[in-house]
Amino acid sequence: MRRTKIVATVGPASDSDEVVLGLVAAGVDVLRLSFAHSDIESNIARLRRIRALAPDVALMVDIPGPKVRACTFGADGVELVVGAEIELREGFDETSSSAVIVIERQNILSGLSVGMAIHIGDGGISLSVIATGARPMARVTSGGVVRGKPGLSLPSSLMNDELPTPDDRKRIEALREEEFEILAVSFVRTAFDVAAVRAVLSRDDVMIMSKIETSEGVANLQEIVEVSDSIMVARGDLGVRMPIEDVPHLQKLIVRTGIRFARPVVVATQMLESMTHSQVPTRAEVTDVSNAVLDGASALMLSGETAIGHDPVGAVETMNRIIVRTEQDFDYAAWGSSLGVQQVVGKRSEESRITATMTGAAWRAAMEEDVVAIVACTRSGMTARAISRFRPPMPIVAVTPFAKTARQLRSSWGVNHVIISDKTDMNELVALALDYLKAEGLAVAGDPVVTMAGSRSTGSAVTDTVRMAFVP
């Protein structure tokens, strides 16, 4: 049973009903919809269509933040050759070429200075500014073929936008009545950014995922994690805006920090990049996916591989095989032992202390008694996420009355779910969970199980009950 979850990006190559259903059948847990392209109405229509097609998976809506993009280079792309000099121009609804790059942002070129670096896409193609003023020019320092409307990474001194940006505010407002589980926010730099987005969204049933991709985001990592519901290691911009040799170490830091606070952490960008055009990944990519699993990531994300790749379903199937094989060698006991049972859910409130203590006790009991499963009875998903941080070797079964909670838990490591009636007491919840374990072949009569439940006796959700049970 795979524990690490898979996120797949829906794009031109995977937007058809047939491919979406194929992605789900291949094992996708979360479908990511980027709102960086097309108009709001088209994106909302797509969201509704995919929600109807895939009612059991989580939907992640990704808003671009202060992302600067170039006008399209066309579907066939344009080759930028090292040494070529290219004019930079501001504009919209135009076409970029090997002679002119049109940038979709007003009043940004006036801040350029000679020597500034501009990176295209994930940084594989780079330019250096050689002239400013009325006709800014740049020289290609690292070339390649660029397609579509790539993002441009500009110096931080030019990017002083507040979150959410005016365009993102419009997107978020349009999403208030829509059915989705996760809102991914780009270029989060401080806890205030998260609070501002949450205030505009005005909903408490959608998880806010903060994408860590700037030096400011890394510097303020813990405070961002504390106010976020989940985290993404956005390695594309992170590797452009910080020394590329730091990215593997930052990945480990971000994953570990997120899990300490019981936040699902997604590792993203270039995981199986060559599968955008190749039938098989490189050995290095396979190793990268495997290492992300060993780092303890909650989920791994496919971007271009499924959005514009030639075989989106094949990319998911490949990632699934790599994860399953890697998890055979995952050191579950060492992970939980080194985590620290008191490290969970942000600041040390009374509720967080109780949850930390009880989930720590549940993990120790599960390990000492070698139980076949841990059952988490939960309404918000907090109990399941709190025990998930220990990365136990046995399955975690979340029992919840809410389909939305069940879908949100599809981004949490090792969590399966059972949806039950909202009017069921804990004994009935546990009985249903034990029936599920038997039906799935995960338990037989007499097997021990650890069960957990939360309450709202203090006004906030808190995990305060741990029991041992035996499969009848």
Image (spheres, rainbow, N blue to C red):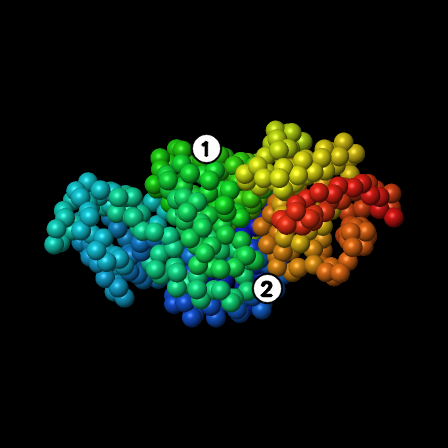
Residue ID for mark 1: 249
In depth, the one of 425 and 281 nearer the eye is 425
In depth, the one of 400 and 68 nearer the eye is 400
| Quarter where residue 3 is shown | top right
Residue at screen point 63% across, 56% down: 405
Q: Secondary structure at mark 1?
A: helix
Question: x%, y% of residue 149?
Answer: 33, 58
Question: x%, y% of residue 165?
Answer: 35, 56
Q: Which mark is residue 259?
A: none
In depth, the one of 467 and 58 nearer the eye is 467
The disc labelled 2 sits on which kind of residue? Ala
Residue at screen point 82% across, 43% down: 469
Residue at screen point 21% across, 55% down: 107
User: Label 2: few (<14), some or many (≥20) within 10 Å?
Assistant: some
In the image, is residue 324 above or below residue 423?
A: above
The answer to whether 462 appears left or right of 95 in the picture is right
Residue 336, visible in the rendered structure:
yes
Residue ID for mark 2: 54
Residue extending farthest front: 458
In depth, the one of 265 and 458 nearer the eye is 458
The disc labelled 1 sits on which kind of residue? His
Residue at screen point 20% across, 48% down: 111
The answer to whether 71 appears left or right of 285 in the picture is left
The answer to whether 325 appears left or right of 194 in the picture is right
Question: x%, y% of residue 45?
Answer: 48, 70
Kindly report the distance in space between the C-alpha atoms of the residues bearing marks 2 and 1.
36 Å
User: Label 1: few (<14), some or many (≥20) within 10 Å?
Assistant: few
Q: Secondary structure at mark 2?
A: loop
The answer to which of marks 2 and 1 sits earlier in the sequence is 2
Badge count:
2
Question: x%, y% of residue 307?
Answer: 46, 58
